[in-house]
Image: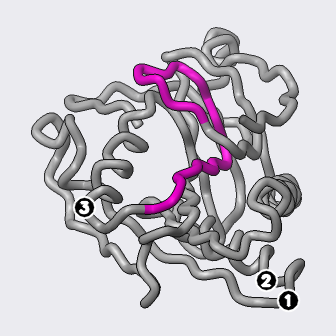
Amino acid sequence: MVNAASRPERPAAARVADGDPRPKAVLEGPDIRRALTRIAHEILERTKGGHDVLLLGIQTRGVTLAERLAAGLREVEGRPVPWGSLDVTMYRDDLRMRPARALGRTELPPEGVDDRVVVLVDDVLFSGRTVRAALDALNDLGRPRAVQLAVLVDRGHRQLPIRADYVGKNLPTSMRETVKVLLDENDGRDAVLLGPTLPTPTGGAE
């Protein structure tokens, strides 16, 4: 598995204790671009050129990241790399605990997933439950030769034996903190924000 070195971050809980509950940007646009460039090169190295790679972004921001990675792979290799989107809503084990939400779209390239090296792409890896749901959804779509996982941020606190193959940044956090990824295509800005967890009537691990 590939893991990136990370800089130690001051816990959001400490900032709250100091009277500063505002989220702090731990990654900005240039940091995210460098992380994705590195991940793209690692994918090419590990898959020996990426000829059978299919990038599948987990809705919502994982799709944006998958598209960016596909563009990065194309820039290096000079050929298109297929990518698509995967909605895992109906496969989540905490579906009844969450507020109702609209279903996203699962879109695959014409060649599908059979005998491909599928790289699942997501923004934040937390408990691992979203990834497990993605694996269940993928199982209904076909039989990949192999499945790998790329995430922009790994914040720890796994509840399942799942580990990313490609990580943009390992970010140590406490359970009292929240990690929010902003992407220009979705949010008008590229950033990763670390801040205190706000109390909500329903919760769920990602």
Left or right placement of residue 95 versus residue 37 in this view: left
Looking at the rendered structure, the kind of residue marked 1 is Gly
Q: Position of residue 192 (x, y in %)?
A: 68, 47
Q: Please give the residue where the numbered disc 3 appears in the rendered image.
A: 140
Looking at the rendered structure, the kind of residue marked 2 is Arg
Kindly indicate whether the residue at mark 1 contacts the one at mark 2 (C-beta within 8 angstroms).
yes
Q: Which mark is residue 78?
A: 1
Left or right placement of residue 170 versus residue 148 in this view: right
Circle 2 sits in a helix, a strand or a loop, which is it? helix
Query: Which residue shows up at 60% across the image and 68% down it?
Result: 66
Left or right placement of residue 153 versus residue 122 in this view: right
Query: Which residue shows up at 78% across the image and 90% down it?
Result: 79
Looking at the rendered structure, the kind of residue marked 3 is Asp
Query: Which residue shows up at 41% across the image and 23% down it?
Result: 160
Q: Please give the residue where the numbered disc 2 appears in the rendered image.
A: 74
Circle 3 sits in a helix, a strand or a loop, which is it? loop
Q: Which residues are magenta?
A: 144-163
The C terminus lies in quadrant: top left
Q: Position of residue 149 (x, y in %)?
A: 58, 48
Residue 135 in the magenta stretch? The answer is no
Left or right placement of residue 65 versus residue 111 in this view: right
Mark-to-mark CA distance, 2 and 3: 28 Å
Dot 1: within a 10 Å radius of its alpha carbon, few (fewer than 14), some, or many (20 or more) residues? Answer: few
Give the camera-side residue of 183 and 15: 183
* Mark toward the start of the polypeptide (3 vs 1): 1
Mark-to-mark CA distance, 2 and 1: 5 Å
The N terminus lies in quadrant: top right
Give the camera-side residue of 115 and 128: 115
Give the camera-side residue of 33 and 145: 145
